[in-house]
Structures are given as C-alpha cells and as structure tokens.
Image (spheres, rainbow, N blue to C red):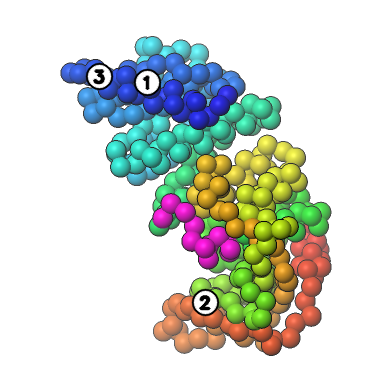
Amino acid sequence: MNLDQLIEDIKVVWNAHQRFEDIEGKRYNYIADVGNCLVYCGLTFPKRRKAILFGFQSKLPNNALPQSKGFSIVRVVHDSLSTELEWLSIICDEQDYEDIYLSMIRDVLGVIRFHYEEESKMNLPQVIVERIKDWQSFLGREKSKYLSKEQEIGLWGELMVLRQLVDKGFSPDLIIQGWTGPDDKAKDFSVFNVCIEAKSFVGRDSIVVKISSLEQLDSSDCREVFLICNSLQIDDGVGLTLSDLIESIFERLDTFADKINLQGKLMRFGLTEESLGYYSTSYSLYSQTLFNIDDSFPKLVHSNTPKEVINAVYSLDLTGYTSDVVFSDIIKAIGDNV
C-alpha cells in the first residue's frame, strides 16, 4: 500500500462528493482494505465536513474517545456499513485544520499498515485511539510546524541517551516508558526513580546549560538525579540526522509494542515519517560530561530559594566544575533495581 497514493484517492472522493447539493446526512465510499481494516471516506452534510472511516474486526475501547480542537472522533453506525465491524470516524470540523488533518490520517494509515506487517496481536482500535491522543498532545503544545534548532539539538541528545541505555542491556520497553521528556516532565528520564536530565549543545570549549525550572535539578523526589551534558558537533561525514538516529534505535527494537510506543512519543514532538526529512543536519557526539546532582551541586531548587520565588530559569557554567561521574554509574543506579 502506497500511502501517498491512498491520500490522493481520498482527496479524489472528497472532491467528487463536493458536487452534491441540498442533501442531508453522510456519503461514504470504499477506499481500501489496509491489513484487517476497511477504509472509507466521504463527507457529512450539509456542512460538507471531510471524514475518514475505519472498520475494525476487533472491539473499540469502552472508554471515552479523545477529542481535539478541529477534529471529532466518533463511533459510527450506518445502514451502508457492515454490522460485523466496529466503525470509527475521524471528522475534520474546521477547514483551517485540513492540512494537519491529512497528516494525521496519513500517519494513522501508516500505523494500521505497520500493525498488519508486524502481525501484532495488540488491539488495533486501541492502538489507533492512543495514536490520536499523541496527536492531541502535539497539537496542544504546537507553536510551529517544526522544531526550532535548539529543540532539534535537545531531542537529538535525549534520543542518544535513550539509545545508550538500550545498548547497555536494559529492556527497550523499560527505557521508552521511562523517557518522560515528550510528556513535558521536569526531567527527561525516570527509570525506577533514577532520574536523568540531558542537556545538549553544539560546541567544544565550554559547558553552559540552561535550567528551565526549580524542579529540573531537584533531587528530593528521586533516588538519584544525573545531569548528562552532550557536546555535539555538526558532522556531515559520520554524523546522524534525527531520522538516522531514530532509525538506529528502531533497529534495536524487537516488538511492535516498543516500536509503536516510541513512535507515539516522537509524535508528541510532531515527528512523523512525513516531517522527518525537514531535519537535515547531521550531528555526532563529541563529548559527554556527567554530574551527580547531590546537595553540593550548584543549583536552584525550592528548598534553597525564598518561598516567594515560585519559578526560575537560569544558566549554569559547568566548564570548570569537577566531576568523576561516568555512564556506568547511571547503569549501576538503575541496575540495582532491575
């Protein structure tokens, strides 16, 4: 199944249905059989809202379906649709959201195809509902269509740390679930309450990092907190783009569940197969400096600032700050709980 051709076929049906006037209700056309899922598309009248329908052989989740600004997600019963399938419709409610709507539909179709190719036993409707929630998270935080250069570098560094942890023998499921950066948590990783904050920058001469809150280096609710400072260099020779790095992580994953969970977390940054080509800069890890955030480490947290200070953003120059922490110290801290 070619996703681009499928999207073009869907557009053709939508345009054809636009010719109908003065009618009520819904008009749907069969588009494709994607794995074990039937795909229809059409319009709802009289407002001519674009809609995609998915017919599943397995049951839809009983909990409430997610709703997003610009989209409606509803269960569907219609005389023209098979009663042997469970039907879910995603409707574009606002014309201003049509470009994002198409990107979401393309992504969902890719997930359905991936589910079939991997012969996954996971409940497909639940997988789709979770993916739509990931899109909600992205839309809720979206400032622009793409990451800024600073955000790109920061995400590259987090993914490098994720790959390092997997390469050290930890379960990918454990590490992916412990990657909390996409959820806007104070720290980027929390595995068995061992917390890691990753800071990444391009440059070799200094270690200056931005701390974005009083919670980011607070160790009061963690067993241990480690700060990893990644010094990157732009390297078109052996470096990795975001897409390259993500692909290298996927090569380390064996299960559909791990792959779809990682995809979902990346989706919260707006990263899809469609958008990854935008990030063309190749980076390599020049050096990695680690710190254990104990009581002596220079930091601002709630316990050492006046109660009137409820938030703070500040920079730390750690260039001359001595540390003998190595990556194996993190491995040991996590491994003691495995």
State whether residue 217 is above or below residue 176. below
The stretch in magenta equals 144-155
Q: Residue at x 27, y 22 (%)?
A: 18
Q: Which badge, 3 or 1, comes first in the chain's sequence?
A: 1
Pick the quarter of the image with the C terminus: bottom right
Can you identify the residue that label 3 sits on? 19
Magenta stretch: includes residue 202: no
Residue farthest to the front?
Answer: 237
Kind of residue sitting beneath label 2: Leu
What type is the residue that disc 1 sits on? Val
For mark 1, what is the residue?
Answer: 13
Q: Position of residue 215 (x, y in %)?
A: 54, 73
Give the total number of marks visible in the rendering.
3
Q: Judge depth for marks 1 and 2 and give the one in front.
A: 1
Q: Nearer the viewer, residue 55 or 199?
A: 199
- Label 3 vs label 2, nearer the camera: 3
Judge whether 84 appears above or below 151 on screen: above
Q: Report the disc number at residue 214.
A: 2
Residue 218 place in picture, x, y as percent: 59, 75
The residues bearing labels 1 and 2 have C-alpha atoms spaced at a distance of 53 Å
Q: Quadrant of residue 120?
A: top right
Instruction: Please name whichever residue, 16 or 124, is drawn nearer the observer in this view of the structure.
Output: 16
Dot placed on the residue nearer the N-terminal end, 1 or 2:
1
Does residue 47 appear in the picture of this structure?
yes
Q: Secondary structure at mark 3?
A: loop
In this orientation, does residue 224 appear? no
